[in-house]
Image (cartoon, rainbow, N blue to C red):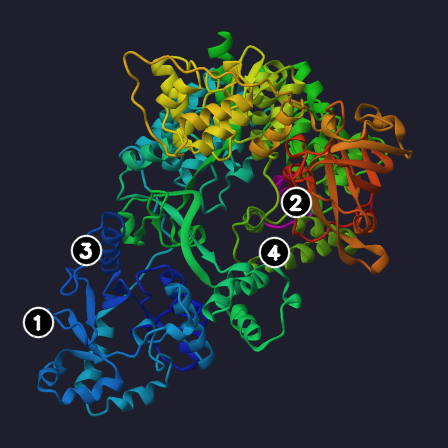
Amino acid sequence: MFINCHSFHSLRYGTIPIQDLVQQTAEHNVRCLALTDINTVTGIYDFYKLCKEKGIKPIVGMEVRVDYELYYICLAKNPKGIGEVNKLLTNYNCEHVQIPKINPDLPDNIIIYPLHNLPEKLSDNEFIGIRYEELNLLIKPKLKKLIPKMVILHPVTFKTKQEYNLHRILRAIDNNTLLSKLNESDVCKATETFVDKKELLQKYIHYPQIIGNTKMIIGYCSFDFDFSTPKNKKYYTDSKENDIKLLRKLAYEGLEKKYSMNHTEAKQRLEKELAVIDQLNFCAYFLITWDIIQYSNKMGFMHVGRGSGANSIVSYCIGITAICPLELDLYFERFLNLNRKTPPDFDIDWSWQRRDIILEYIFKKYGKDHVAFCGTNVEFKYRSIFREVGKAFGLPKEELDALATKPMNQHDDNSVFRLVHKYGKLLEKFPNQRSMHSCGILISEEPITNYSALEMPPKGFPIVQFDMHTAEDIGLEKFDILSQRGLGTINDTVQLIEKKRGIKVDIEDTALSKDEVKCNEFLSIGKTIGCFYIESPAMRGLLRRLKCDNYKVLVAASSIIRPGVAQSGMMKEYIFRHNNPTQFEYFHEVFEKELGETYGIMVYQEDVIKIALHFGGLPASDGDVLRRAMSGKGRSLAALQKVKDHFFESCRAKGHPEQLSKEVYRQIESFAGYSFCKAHSASYAVESYQSLFLKVFYPIEFMVCAINNGGGFYRTEVYVHEAKMSGATINNPCVNLSEWQTTVYGTDVYLGLMHIEKLEGRLGQLIPEERKKNGEYRSLENFVKRIPIGIEILQILIFIGAFRFTGKQKHELLIEARFLLGNNKEVYRQPTLLEEPQKSYHLPKIERNKFEDAFDEIEILGFPVSFSPFDLLQTKYRGSVMAKNLIKYHKKQVKMLAYLISRKHVPIKNKREGNKRDEMFFGTWIDAEGEYFDTAHFPDSLKQYPFQGGGCYLLLGTVEVDFHFPTITIHKMAKMPFIPDPRYSMDQEKSQETQRNLREDVSMTFRKPYPQEHEIGLPREKMR
């Protein structure tokens, strides 16, 4: 009888999670239920499975609305029916085809109209839904004659009175209005909750035909879905036989190029993999990925293949990945095993500038009817919940800001705030809107609308209405098509070197960078700023602690920096064992045999599986559950708990000490969702080496391209500093020499016009375009005649020195600009054939303070260029020691003057206060010589000497050298004042303002504190 139920996937309307809806149905002893969310099928697959578990007949469909108006409810008679309604909605969402208000062509659906939208004629599959509160209307002759086509309509939208209020809040949020201003049509009826089935039928007792019709249409509907069969595109060619034939041919062609036909080990591994790929029907998945790479290569794009697919020699031979699995002894079973039901991950990265071209190819090649992005359900988040609910209650902006920014215990204790808290907590984990998965593409065998309606988000590629977990559940495996700035930097640098120096660098030849001595020297001292994945302070510190000077150690470092390894305490232990290989014993022979390369420490996902299988004695199927958990893909906590139980049972059976088993499983658990497989780390390491090679041998070009690709971990200023340290002369933007992006002439780097904050992109790109077309700008007047510009932006260009080629002082140019653009309007002046000579004005020469330009630069660019921040300090003191000498001062107190680059917030346990959660910061700085060093700021120090924004600080602290890496533990610090801004010598307050614009990079961490050394139970001797 309940043929119109809404879950919370009816966004900002329904209030019932799918699980609760099915549970409530079971409690009411109802044996049949229809899920008809508004314009979505997001929940139908979870709904189907849960209903089957409870012995309830699931009916699926959709409530079709346009601009909030209910047109009709569709109930799918069969799986084909849900495809019909998906197609209808997809055409509306993606092609702007209007949805018919009546008589839609949906033969495999039951259509139920509300009383306010009755068609003139009803087809055989069309009915009218009548609510029990509308039964008294049946005395009207017009409606009475329609009783033979009527069914019971009792929508379900909420469970309790409280949830009805929540529904109203959701409707206010959706309409961006106040609760008090909601209309009756904006919200559901107050009766839309579950009632007892007998009670509902009693209300229709005088209309047996309506009851009979309802039972009849329920009988018509049957939605059976096979979750076990793959829904991805079946074949790349026309058959399975031809797919494996093509894959084998490609693999052996690659084998000959990359090894040789006589390489026995490679051939054996290749044959083993091909057999498993064929047996598991993954050939098409490999060939489609290969096809995408072929297109990329044809276009001259650079890509990186990573993920577990990089464990495969087949993927290496056919060019998907650049990682030799034999060189690194990559674990084949992590990539593929017969227990694995889903294809391996191929995470393919392209430059952020190129990804859309790849996506367009995929949609065109495989057909828009078969390709879509995965969706994601964006939930209401802590801050947005309180802000949105507060708005619905009519709170003013100041109070909304307080709700969104302050912790709950600091909110006012008044009745409205209490209501906001009450309903805000109810909204936690509620889906708020659908969005696009960052990289997951689905390519289906049947039209993708057989499984979901599609939506068109602003990015311009259609998405399905469910997330990656549901996609995987129903048999649709995603292809991960990613983008990153690191590849853009590498690609652009190679092109820039060829353009500026005429040198072709074959950066794809990984031996070029991996085996280069100078690259390994830079790596071992952490001289890696700008390099992909290895430039953060934490990573540079790790490289120095490991004295990392080769590819294999870098592969390990790329994984142990991940939260899972660090949180388990394995990162600290790995550093110790790497530096002291004779000062520990393997605590069990399995660890020595399986993890000898990493000193008996679990570093990669493969290591966890090896230990679970060989130490714990788990079956391979449990290993697959662990793999999915570590990849962040497993949704079943129950399955993971079963694995845990099996692990301890098996360890006891094998006679392992209980303490050892507990410690091993603690490490296994800490990996979940936060570790890399070895192939993934190896892929990252290759890209790190490629960028490092360019940094070492072509540092200026590399830094220019890092700046143009938006940098990485740090702000632009840091990469500009790196270019300067590499021998570049940094020049402010110039209308005659600068491009939109930063460019280089020899060792002269000209900052791009893009770095002038208030200069809009259209105008910033027009300036160099016009110069290329019609020659250099000859004067300020000539520039103004050729570029439509207002006085405000023109003044900014003058202040940054963009017209210094004229040889005139800034004050002269400013007066001239006023003469030329006195009315402040953007006017395009068509150049004339015979230009009038420019009037010349003789203005007095003004003596300018040499530091004025630096303050202009801070204001416009965010950092000084003409001088260093140290030049602007009032003090001439530069510290008692420089960064390069810190390693000699272990356990000694030092005083340093430094410029703040970045600081990272880290949660810790405060021992003095009973392990209460507290916070500290790690700082990264440069000294007066431009060299980097790091500091640690513990809670006691921070309370007395907090950070006060960007700028220079005087630091007092003790040097601690931890495995070759010095850090200063700060006791005291003070921000040092700049000289007063000479541009505002008459205004003391204003003269201090500019230095407050100096920036710092701040990163916050919200994880649990890492365990201390004494909390890690890892023994360094054999356990017997």
Q: Could you tell me if the residues under marks 1 and 2 are in contact, i.e. CB atoms within 8 Å?
A: no
Which residue in the protein does label 4 denote?
Answer: 643
Which stretch appears magenta? 603-620
Q: Could you tell me if the residues under marks 2 and 3 are in contact, i.e. CB atoms within 8 Å?
A: no
Q: Main secondary structure of the magenta part?
A: helix
Spatial CA distance of label 1 from label 4 is 61 Å
Residue 10 higher or lower than 885, as above or below: below
Residue 269 appears in the figure? no
Q: Residue at x 22, y 84 (%)?
A: 211
Disc nearer the start of the sequence (3/1) = 3
Which residue in the protein does label 3 denote?
Answer: 98
Residue 654 appears in the figure? yes
Spatial CA distance of label 1 from label 2 is 64 Å
Q: Secondary structure at mark 3?
A: loop
Spatial CA distance of label 2 from label 4 is 22 Å
Q: With 26 as the anchor, is 223 left or right in this view?
A: left
